[in-house]
Image (tube, helix red, strand yellow):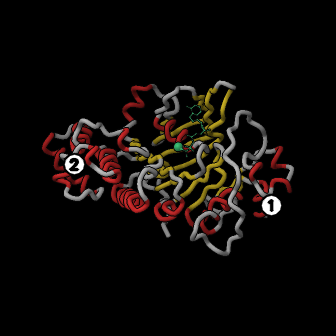
Amino acid sequence: METVDIGKALLQLENLSIDYRINTGMLSAVHNVNLTLRHGEIYALVGESGCGKSTIAHNVMRLSIDHNEVINGRIIFEGQDITSIPEPEMEKIRGKKIGMIFQNPLDSLNPVYRSGTQVTEALMLDGMSKKEAVLRTIELFRDVQIPNPEQRIAAFPHELSGGMRQRVMIAMMLARNPSLLIADEPTTALDVTVEAQILRIMKRLQQKFRTGILLITHNFGIVAEIADRIGIMYAGEIVEEGTVFDIFKNPVHPYSRALLSTLPRYHKSLRRIAAIDGNVPRITEKRAECRFRNRCPYSSEDERCATQSPNAVSFGSGHIVRCHRAEEDRV
Ligand SMILES: Nc1ncnc2c1ncn2[C@@H]1O[C@H](COP(=O)(O)OP(=O)(O)OP(=O)(O)O)[C@@H](O)[C@H]1O
Ligand SMILES: [Mg+2]
């Protein structure tokens, strides 16, 4: 089992809420999220489609496309509140101190440049000579386990497989030695074996460079293998947070339990609830209620689920759950 790195806070989200302006009013995509990612740890954010994972990632990087969001709360990176710093200052952080890798590396790699050139140029931005940068690129390609790096640096992105492209993308990010890497579904487009390889590469790099990683993924199996801590999101909220051990061996929230029950090798002694029907609701009216209640097998037993937002309840060091029923369980 992984030991949790108890280093200093690298990224802190404080009561972060993000609403999108939409035709019919406002959509609450992220609601009161508190999250601390420490230097050198891998924090995995998991949850079904539409629960707000990418919204968090894009807003930390300030990469929103539509510019229709309203942000409340604070995003603190290396002790600095970056929630509303001017764009030129953000440009010094983006790419250099916070790197991001996306689902489809072809979107981020330039098709007309050789794969090595893209990494070499990132290094030269930081003042390295061309010769040094090429040697360092080969080293980085080796770090991300690209075979024959001396030859592969000359390949164009379209000549590489999906897995190789994602390795180039990771090498490109690492070239600038960011302290935080945000990986939003970095392996969704890849097949299962390649996915596992890429995630293991990320794990080894985290250990070698002590990069903090915010990993967004649907793949719980991989999370169990490489993450230090996990946040389970539902309809814009983190409903449970804890170490890999807490979440896999002692999940408390009915949503976490339902998600985990869909895993093939899930711990047998845990009571299984049927895989949850329905979808993540789009919240356009903020009410005092539990956002999971319409899909929760227990909400009819407790009137608070319809009238109060659950508070965060501690189940031990760093294991936090938001569920009315859990409050009683703990007593
Ligand atoms: N620019 C936008 N304008 C309006 N609504 C948006 C915008 N971006 C996302 N949303 C909505 O916000 C909610 C959260 O979306 P988000 O993309 O953050 O979810 P996600 O957890 O990343 O999902 P997935 O797993 O499918 O990537 C969804 O209901 C989505 O439709
Ligand atoms: Mg997403």
Q: Amino acid at mark 1?
A: Glu
Front position in the image: 62 or 67: 67
x then y, percent, for residue 204: 36, 61
Q: Amino acid at mark 2?
A: Thr
Using residue 156 as the reference point, say whether residue 271 is left or right of it: right
In the rendered image, residue 178, in percent from the top left (x then y), is placed at: 36, 45
Q: Nearer the viewer, mark 1 or mark 2?
A: 2
Quarter location, residue 114: top left
**Element assignment for label 2:** helix
* Residue in view at x 47 percent, y 41 percent: 77
Seen as rendered, the residue at the extreme bottom is 269
Which residue in the structure is indicated by mark 2? 137
Instruction: Indicate the secondary structure of the residue bearing disc 1.
Output: helix
Looking at the image, residue 179 sits to the left or right of residue 152; the answer is right
Image location of residue 214, percent across then percent down: 48, 49
Q: Quadrant of ligand 1?
A: top right
Q: How far, Cα to Cα, is label 1 from label 2?
A: 55 Å
**Which one is nearer the viewer's eye here, 259 or 225?**
259
Q: Residue at x 30, y 48 (%)?
A: 168
Give the image location of residue 124, x and y in percent: 21, 38
Q: Which mark is residue 328?
A: 1
Left or right of 44 in this view: 212: left
Kindly give the residue lying farthest to the left in the view shown.
Answer: 131
